Image (tube, coloured by chain):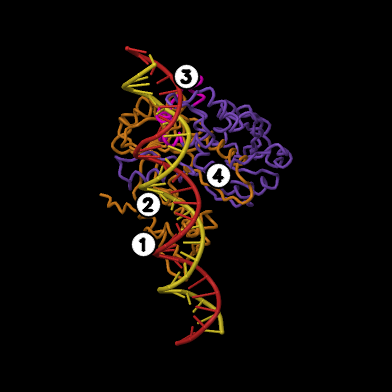
Chain colours: A orange, B purple, C red, D yellow
Amino acid sequence: MHIEQQKIPQATAKRLPLYYRFLNNLYNQGKMRVSSKELSEAVKVDSATIRRDFSYFGALGKKGYGYNVEYLLSFFRKTLDQDETTKVALIGVGNLGTAFLHYNFMKNNNTKIQFAFDTNEGKIGTEVGGVPVAHIDDLEEKIGEDISVAILTVPSSAAQGIADRLVKAGVSGILNFTPARITVPDHVRVHHIDLAVELQALVYFLKHYPLDVEENIESDEED
Amino acid sequence: MHIEQQKIPQATAKRLPLYYRFLNNLYNQGKMRVSSKELSEAVKVDSATIRRDFSYFGALGKKGYGYNVEYLLSFFRKTLDQDETTKVALIGVGNLGTAFLHYNFMKNNNTKIQFAFDTNEGKIGTEVGGVPVAHIDDLEEKIGEDISVAILTVPSSAAQGIADRLVKAGVSGILNFTPARITVPDHVRVHHIDLAVELQALVYFLKHYPLDVEENIESDEED
DNA sequence: GTGAGATTGTGAAAAACTTAACGACTTAGT
DNA sequence: ACTAAGTCGTTAAGTTTTTCACAATCTCAC
């Protein structure tokens, strides 16, 4: 299916969605061209890094001119598979889960949250942000072949148990917002986003790193 | 004030809060000792990396034995300034902001959200997760010398404007959850956490990277 | 057309980070 | 006391990522 160009560094891959969104903004503003320098100021990534990143996909720009916004955008749309929607499930309709559900993902995005799950009877059967909420007992049933990615916004004590069920149900990627580090088989990819850690890391940097001649850091970045 | 040991790599610094939390868990479980291998399995970081990380702070372990949990914990407590609480403000009491306010930060943490701000009259004067909500017009007044860090969970259109005000009010670190990339003076540190980007990056990795012989990746975070 | 100015794409160097490997030391069992 | 097994701390190697710096090329105003 996918021919592995396989050269793109992970650091680059992580920046692609960011580039994509800003290019989209520029396009909507009617901008026709953009230089790596301009883009650099907008996304806060060094311009040489941007050029290097783009160059992995070939020569997308023109010397002395910059990049054609529309062309670049359509190129990224293909590359990021923006045409093909990835279906997502969200587990745990608490505050964080609700925030996600209200996030307008379909705009500029190739992902759609198809179902949300919770244990709270009051929420089941309702819709949050246009997404139906089902009982978590129905997880296996509703996650068909379709859904390959899950967002985990449950209490951390429930994280590993749910993760096991998700994996068994066929999910191959999990975005884990709980502080628990979950264990999964090798073929499943987990990205951890730990709010408390992010805050503490920021505080640590403020206290221990020279404040003045310092660039910003992407969380994950992993950021 | 702070003697700059200044050798600790940023990648290491980002992992410290993670180590700290897991050590705390172990301690609460009554565990007396831990090896880099055990810890590795818990936090999903290579054991050599853990040993290397710890070694920046000196010889904390014993050969043939491992690390004494209590000692390590007390060491990290000092290093991460866990005794000295950093005061934080949160701007934007939406779903995401509310999630943060309910997060029990004080537990295992050196940060305390002192004030929250919003424009919604219904919320002002109430408490969310024990934190008083004030009107955003009072931001400058309430952020005294005290508060050095802000969490930004406002709509992205408001992000830059608020950021400017925060900087003027003396904040030196901003944890930005909006998709907007904000511009700040050099002496202010911003960490971006972009939920949509995280999700898209995960999807991209799933589609383009060999699924089987692959390690997990920490977001951020930078990222 | 021409030339000054802009900007890319990339080779090469540097920096940052991770991992392997192992000597040295510790523990614990006998 | 001796030994086998375990584990650290670190040197060195490997990998990944960023950055510099500049030739090549293009644009645009005149």
Q: Secondary structure at mark 2?
A: loop
Kindly identify which chain the residue marked by label 1 belongs to.
Answer: A
Q: Secondary structure at mark 3?
A: loop
Circles 2 and 3 in contact, beta carbons < 8 Å: no
Disc 4 marks which residue?
B191
Q: CA distance from mark 2 to mark 1?
A: 15 Å
Mark 3 Cα shell of 10 Å, populated few (<14), some (14-19), many (≥20): some
Question: Of marks 3 and 4, which one's residue comes earlier in the chain?
Answer: 3
Residue B91 visible from this viewpoint: no
Q: CA distance from mark 2 to mark 4?
A: 24 Å
Three-letter amino acid code of the residue under disc 1: Gly
- Of labels 2 and 4, the one closer to you: 4
Q: Residue at x 34, y 43 (%)?
A: B206
Report x, y in % for residue B114.
66, 32
Res A187 label: none
The residue that appears at 68% across and 35% down in the rendered structure is B134
Give the chain letter at badge 2. A
